[in-house]
Amino acid sequence: MKILNLLKAVVLPLAIVATSAGTIQTASAAPATNAVAPSGAPYSLLSRDNTVLVLVDHQVGLFTGVRDIDTGELKHNVVALAKAAKTLGIPVIVTATMPDGMWGPTIPELTAALPGVPVISRTSINAWDDPNVRAAIEKTGRKQILIAGVSLEVCATFPALSLKAAGYDPRVVLDASGTFSDAKRTVGLQRLAGAGIPVTDYATAGVEMLQGNDDPKAQQVYADLDMPFANLVWQLKNASRK
């Protein structure tokens, strides 16, 4: 009898699970469809039908102060992400803080990649506080917001925090953002992590929204992303055919 009771004590907890409502389910019950991050916050993969790309303050003057990433690499990444978003039909919102002042205009490579997309000029530090930026985001009706900005800890992080509080699902694109010291980069990343806001990179965000390599737009998206290692693989493949 003691052995039987011991077996019950070990096996039964593995066979049943108590739900928060107090009901009992067998361990073979289907898993929940919504994934949950370690913080307890629900999350899902980016969808091209529900994503907006918000680019904050990629301005010539601010680029001169960037120290945590090579400015050439930063420029490449943000332009590549913008091109991929355009190919996928994802709305892109570009904003700049007082572009006629000391921070200067948006980098010309970015505006060239987004013909017809206006640059929303603002004075607010937090882009979400600007009524024109907020209206542009709300108009899309989309909830997943990809954000990149210069600087990371202010121009990307502040609107990400506000968007999350407003019920949106923000993600910050690390290598399409930049800041002025390693300390500032660390502060920004820690603050995002503490708020449960995911950080991604430009190429991962692009292929995440693409979803399938059999998509008719796949070849153009990869060309837009212009990943150096992918170009090398393609060159090796072509060389092997000769």
Image: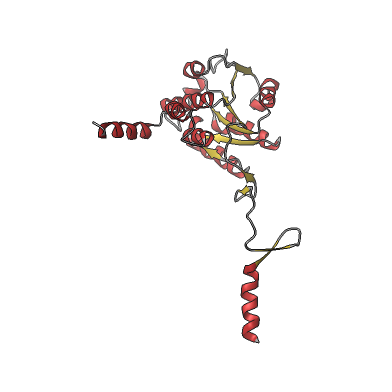
Quadrant location, the N terminus? bottom right
Quadrant location, the C terminus? top left
Q: Is residue 183 left or right of residue 231?
A: right
Please say if 89 is above or below 194. above
Q: Residue at x 65, y 77 (%)?
A: 8
According to the image, what is the colour scheme of the structure? secondary structure
Please say if 102 is above or below 2. above
The image quarter containing residue 96 is: top right
Q: Nearest the camera: 156 or 179?
A: 156
Q: Nearest the camera: 235 or 149?
A: 235
Please say if 71 is above or below 189. above
| Residue 206: % across, % down | 50, 32
Residue found farthest to the top: 100
Q: Nearest the camera: 124 or 5?
A: 5
Q: Nearest the camera: 116 or 1?
A: 1
| Residue 168: % across, % down | 67, 35
Q: Is residue 119 left or right of residue 181?
A: right
Residue found farthest to the left: 242
- Marker count (numbered): 0
Q: Is residue 178 visible?
A: no
| Residue 106: % across, % down | 53, 18
Residue found farthest to the bottom: 1
Q: Is residue 224 visible?
A: yes
| Residue 153: % across, % down | 57, 33
Q: Residue at x 46, y 18 (%)?
A: 109
Q: Residue at x 76, y 62 (%)?
A: 22
The image quarter containing residue 14 is: bottom right
The image quarter containing residue 71 is: top left
Q: Residue at x 59, y 15 (%)?
A: 118
